[in-house]
Image (cartoon, helix red, strand yellow):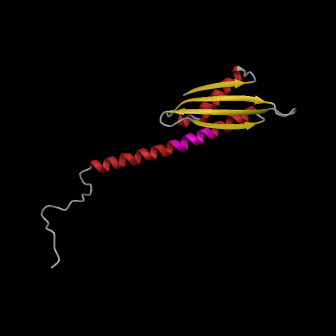
Amino acid sequence: MRVYVHTTNFELSDLYRCHIEERIHYIFRHLNRDVQSVSIRLNKTSEKLDSIETSSKIQVKTNNLPLIYAEKTSDDLYIAIIGSANRARKNVSRRLNKFNKLLEQLKALKKQKNSPNTLRLKRPHNQRLQTAA
């Protein structure tokens, strides 16, 4: 799994960037086999004079699913990153569970279709139709 960190309107130190990458790897550790890459966009905006808002947008690319997005805005950069990463992880795991259930259902249907003991709608040849007299 690859982690990309992009920043806008501020510089991120290498130590903090490595820490963010480690946290993302930790959050997605159970989904590491299914997740190809995680892209994080960090943006700082000062809407008010006394507070600076930080937004974190995460894009997760998986093997079998379309792109998954999550976003969190907070005054603290770390809270924004962890919040959006947790939301993205929940979305990925929920969608992967649905996808895996559908695959199991399809496999069961194919197995049922190909098995020799499937129900046949045709009547056996040795039985005759009984007509009401």
Q: Position of residue 49 (x, y in %)?
A: 87, 32
- Name the residue located 70 percent from the left edge and 29 percent from the top edge: 42
- Name the residue located 12 percent from the left edge and 63 percent from the top edge: 126
Q: Residue furthest bottom?
A: 133
Q: Residue furthest left?
A: 126
Labels in figure, total = 0
Q: Is residue 90 magenta?
A: yes
For the residue pair 27 and 34, the one nearer the viewer reads as 34
Q: Position of residue 22 (x, y in %)?
A: 63, 28
- Name the residue located 27 percent from the left edge and 47 percent from the top edge: 114
Task: State the predominant SS element of the stretch in magenta.
Answer: helix
Where on the picture, by quarter, is residue 46? top right
Where on the picture, by quarter, is residue 56? top right
Quadrant for the N terminus, please.
top right
Left or right: 13, with 63 as reference point: right
Left or right: 71, with 62 as reference point: right
Quadrant for the C terminus, please.
bottom left
Left or right: 67, with 83 as reference point: left
Q: In the rendered view, would you say 18 is above or below 133?
A: above
Q: Position of residue 35 (x, y in %)?
A: 53, 33
For the residue pair 75 and 23, the one nearer the viewer reads as 75
Where on the picture, by quarter, is residue 122? bottom left
Q: Position of residue 64 (x, y in %)?
A: 47, 36
Q: Is residue 128 magenta?
A: no
Q: Which region shows up in magenta? A: 87-95
Q: Residue furthest right?
A: 49
